[in-house]
Amino acid sequence: QVPLVESGGGLVQPGGSLRLSCAASGSIFRFSPMGWYRQAPGNQRELVARVITGGSTNYADSVKGRFSISRDNAKNTVYLQMNSLKPEDTAVYYCNTFPPAGSWGQGTQVTVSS
């Protein structure tokens, strides 16, 4: 069983929006803080946003005010709403626990370009 499945990426123009979803297995999701991470070509994977089980959130400075992370505990799903997208947001986006553990999913590609 694949524990993490990301979706929702795509090609969007600068200033546009996307909503990413991550379906996690119950054993991973239920008691874990969850995070969205991204990796651009030539860069290390970085944490973009995290949400604890109670709903409190934290963001990287580069996305603060533009991205919003949320979780639906009933659906074992974590979301990343991305607004005012910039070309520098182009990357493969992954979800995992925070801190990350176990296998990574396949990720979802986000490309911001005109």
Image (cartoon, grey):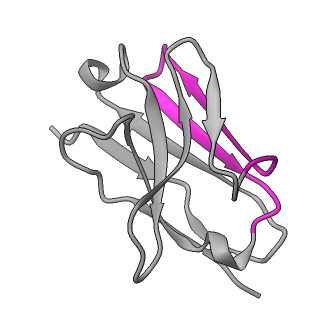
Q: Position of residue 53 (x, y in %)?
A: 49, 15
In magenta stretch: residue 78: yes
Q: Residue at x 29, y 52 (%)?
A: 105
- Identity of the residue furthest to the left in this view: 1
**Residue 22 figure quarter:** top left
Q: Position of residue 19 (x, y in %)?
A: 65, 50
Left or right of 114? Residue 42 is left
The answer to whether 75 is drawn above or below residue 108 in the figure is above
Q: Residue at x 40, y 36 (%)?
A: 23
Toward the viewer: 69 or 44? Answer: 44
Left or right of 12? Residue 33 is left
The answer to whether 74 is drawn above or below residue 43 in the figure is above
**Number of numbered tags placed on the structure image:** 0
**Residue 106 figure quarter:** bottom left
Q: Position of residue 51 (x, y in %)?
A: 55, 28
Q: Position of residue 91 (x, y in %)?
A: 51, 71
In magenta stretch: residue 49: no
Toward the viewer: 97 or 9? Answer: 97
Q: Quadrant of the C terminus?
A: bottom right
The answer to whether 2 is drawn above or below residue 57 in the figure is below
Q: Residue at x 36, y 23 (%)?
A: 29
Q: Quadrant of the N terminus?
A: top left
Left or right of 63? Residue 93 is left
- Identity of the residue furthest to the front in this view: 61
Toward the viewer: 39 or 79? Answer: 39
**The magenta segment:** 64-85
The answer to whether 99 is drawn above or below residue 48 in the figure is above
